[in-house]
Amino acid sequence: MSEYKSPVYNVIGVPIEKITANDYNPNAVAPPEMALLETSIWEDGYTQPVVTVHDKENDMYIVVDGFHRFLTLKNSERIREREGGILPCVVLDKAISDRMASTIRHNRARGSHNIELMSNIVTELVEMGKGDRWICKHIGMSPDELLRMKQITGLASLFQDKDFSEAWDAEVS
């Protein structure tokens, strides 16, 4: 039997006022789907905890995955009242780059993420010093996807320290 215990076995109730969104989530949900999420939570309750990290310095929980479930509790008076203002959460212990990677993995596993916000995360990871191999491995991108993402952003910093072959030489007449 393994000593490892998945975070889902340690769900805790966190008061809504002690939870905050991260500033990098690339997932977007349209209003009709948000309404459906509110209905789902009203009809079925919270069936999945929100994934967070605990910021001990500020005693706040930062959302890694489950932002829209968090928003539903925050914005729906009937759900907030029924749930007593408490959100079921699991807590990860991860550095910021690993949190970003976790958010991307959760979003991509569900099949939804915003390309512009995703490119912002790639930019931040590159600026944090994470290499292409790390980014591909941790957020589930192929090298070609990562290259396209870097091309979309158009930021020269994403290509720094890269060797490019000289495919041709211009002849001067």
Image (tube, rainbow, N blue to C red):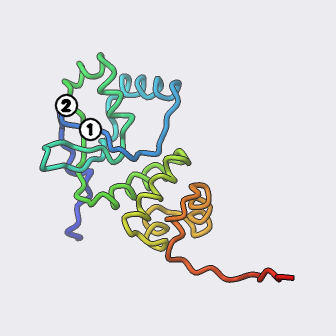
Q: In the rendered image, which residue does mark 1 sit on? A: 20
Q: Residue at x 26, y 38 (%)?
A: 20
- Taking the image as shown, residue 173 lies to the left or right of residue 161, namely right
Tell me the element at label 2: helix
- Taking the image as shown, residue 29 lies to the left or right of residue 8, namely right
The part of the image, by quadrant, that contains residue 11 is: top left
- State which quarter of the image contains the C terminus: bottom right
User: Which is nearer the eye, 117 or 163?
Assistant: 163
Q: Residues within 10 Å of mark 2 (few under 14, many from 20)?
A: few
- State which quarter of the image contains the N terminus: bottom left
Q: Residue at x 60, y 63 (%)?
A: 145
Rendered location of residue 69, percent (x, y): 36, 34
Q: In the rendered image, which residue does mark 2 sit on? A: 17
Q: Residues within 10 Å of mark 1 (few under 14, many from 20)?
A: some
Spatial CA distance of label 1 from label 2 is 8 Å
**Residues at circles 1 and 2 in contact by the CB criterion of under 8 Å:** no
- Taking the image as shown, residue 46 lies to the left or right of residue 131, namely left
